[in-house]
Image (spheres, helix red, strand yellow):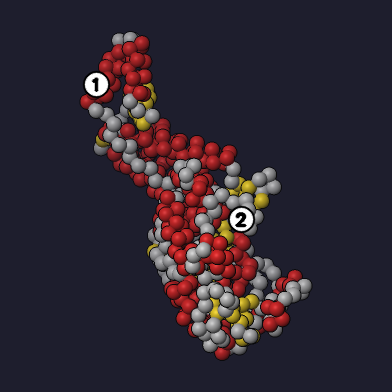
């Protein structure tokens, strides 16, 4: 299995720290509003990666945090007239409902920053004592110049960052030794959440929070750290510097970053700051959750996705096609028999599986994996036309189909039994009418069944039905 590592900008053979186990941290939301589709893209992308790692036999310990201490939450609390804690609680609850609707599995642990304040203070204190950080008028800053590889993740040098920050002015800049030093602890402002610390009352900076939660829960070195491309700098860059300065060890072995969701003719990045976002909460009221999930999960995680009515419509059509394959195969479940004429079919299924694994092992390429799934679906449609189906082949094909769909987060339900005795009699009567070439009566019965919510399909393998 090969993974594209943002830090080295190349694909690398995946070798976990502990054989058979993956420690994975993904930056979660800042809970001051509903998540938008761009946020959902990251959440779904790493859910697919997690599911595929498990499919390949790894035990995945998956941690994704909630940032519940932040300037944006404080602003939202003022606007809504409630406490910052109430803002966070409200949007964490909504977040959990929205991702459940998108069939995203909850993280094994979802730490909240507010629960880790003492650990954050301890972490910063170590950095201060090791001279990696300094206090200035109640704030604490990290000495970037002491960390030579700073900026490597985002492919920037310290000199370039210094030049870019040269024009910054303001009271905070005056308190820093260097314009590119970043805050680990912020002096308290009036009417905002704050805690006692060795440097006075204040609250943590954003970047230190993830370093503390990741190392506390997963260890000083972890296998995979993920997030959106916009987190490469400064967030993940700062995480590396402060974590490795404290521990003296490599913080993350593989950095993974998902592509943006874009909108409009200019493929503008979707974001709250640009005001061009669509929230998952609202979209779920308009679209089938499976369609949203398919659109976000079937593209390669590093590639951008254009969000539009046409992309949603295309996803809807593809989901319907896959559901038809599922329903058609389920329809034949009573026609399977033990058979010795199955070797070639099982070999064909094995070749599908080998190809699917090869594509997904290449940096979790779900787009190519999806192509293999379509080939399997096409084969299943042809196979289901046979008069007699082998039990072993049927079960293996269906298992692959359902399992690969579940990696993408798509799960179909077996349609409820609709056929009453009366309807069964009507279907039987229609068969007799067709055999007698009484097509008017056959059509009349078909239309009658349609009014009762059942669609009939005449196939070489017999009559099939599905919900209207």
Up the image or down, 440 lies above or below 285; here it is: above
Kindly identify the residue that appears in the image at 50 percent across and 50 percent down: 280
Q: Which residue is mark 2?
A: 271
For residue 193, which numbered disc appears in the image?
none
Kindly identify the residue that appears in the image at 35 percent across and 42 percent down: 413
* Depth order, front residue of 384/240: 240
> Can residue 266 be seen at all in this image of the molecule?
yes
Q: Secondary structure at mark 1?
A: helix
Kindly identify the residue that appears in the image at 30 percent across and 36 percent down: 416
Q: Are marks 2 and 1 in contact (CB under 8 Å)?
A: no
* Depth order, front residue of 296/99: 99
Q: Would you call the spot at circle 1 few (<14 residues within 10 Å), some (14-19), or many (20 or more)?
A: few
Kindly identify the residue that appears in the image at 41 percent across and 34 percent down: 324
Q: Which residue is mark 1?
A: 425
Up the image or down, 202 lies above or below 26; here it is: below
Q: Relative to residue 253, is residue 403 drawn left or right?
A: left
Q: Position of residue 48 (x, y in %)?
A: 47, 54
């Amino acid at each position: 299995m090969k993974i594209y590592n943002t830090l080295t900008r190349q694909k690398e053979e995946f070798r976990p720290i502990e054989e058979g186990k993956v420690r994975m941290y993904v930056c979660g939301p800042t809970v001051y509003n509903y998540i938008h589709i761009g946020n959902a893209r990251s959440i779904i992308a790493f859910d697919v990666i997690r599911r595929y790692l498990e499919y390949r036999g790894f035990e995945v310990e998956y941690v994704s945090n909630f940032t519940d201490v932040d300037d944006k939450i404080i602003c939202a609390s003022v606007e809504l007239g409630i406490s910052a804690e109430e803002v966070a609680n409200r949007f964490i609850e909504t977040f959990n409902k929205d991702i459940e609707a998108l069939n995203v599995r909850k993280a094994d642990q979802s730490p909240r920053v507010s629960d880790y304040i003492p650990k954050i203070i301890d972490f910063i204190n170590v950095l201060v004592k090791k001279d990696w950080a300094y206090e200035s008028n109640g704030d604490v800053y990290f000495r970037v110049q002491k960390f030579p590889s700073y900026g490597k993740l985002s492919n920037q040098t310290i000199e370039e960052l210094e030049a870019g920050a040269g024009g910054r002015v303001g009271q905070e800049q005056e308190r820093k030794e260097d314009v590119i030093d970043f805050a680990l602890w912020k002096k308290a402002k009036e009417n905002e959440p704050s805690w006692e610390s060795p440097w006075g009352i204040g609250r943590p900076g954003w970047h230190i929070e993830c370093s503390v939660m990741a190392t506390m829960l997963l260890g000083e070195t972890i296998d995979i750290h993920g997030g959106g491309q916009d987190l490469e700098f400064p967030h993940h860059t700062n995480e590396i510097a402060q974590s490795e300065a404290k521990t003296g060890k490599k913080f993350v072995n593989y950095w993974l970053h998902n592509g943006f969701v874009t909108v409009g003719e200019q493929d503008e990045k979707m974001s709250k700051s640009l005001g061009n976002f669509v929230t998952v909460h609202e979209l779920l009221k308009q679209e089938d959750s499976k369609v949203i999930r398919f659109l976000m999960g079937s593209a390669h995680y590093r590639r951008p996705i254009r969000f539009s009515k046409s992309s949603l419509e295309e996803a809807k059509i593809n989901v319907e096609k896959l559901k038809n394959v599922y329903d058609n195969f389920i329809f034949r479940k009573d026609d399977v028999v033990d058979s010795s004429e199955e070797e070639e079919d099982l070999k064909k299924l094995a070749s599908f599986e080998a190809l699917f694994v090869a594509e997904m092992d290449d940096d979790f390429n779900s787009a190519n994996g999806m192509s293999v799934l379509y080939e399997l679906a096409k084969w299943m449609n042809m196979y289901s036309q046979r008069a007699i189906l082998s039990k072993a082949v049927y079960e293996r094909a269906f298992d692959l189909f359902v399992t690969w769909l579940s990696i993408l987060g798509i799960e179909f339900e077996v349609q409820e039994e609709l056929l009453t005795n009366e309807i069964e009699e009507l279907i039987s009567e229609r068969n007799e009418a067709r055999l007698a070439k009484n097509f008017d009566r056959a059509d009349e019965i078909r239309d009658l069944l349609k009014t009762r919510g059942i669609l009939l399909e005449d196939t070489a393998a017999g009559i099939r039905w599905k919900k209207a």
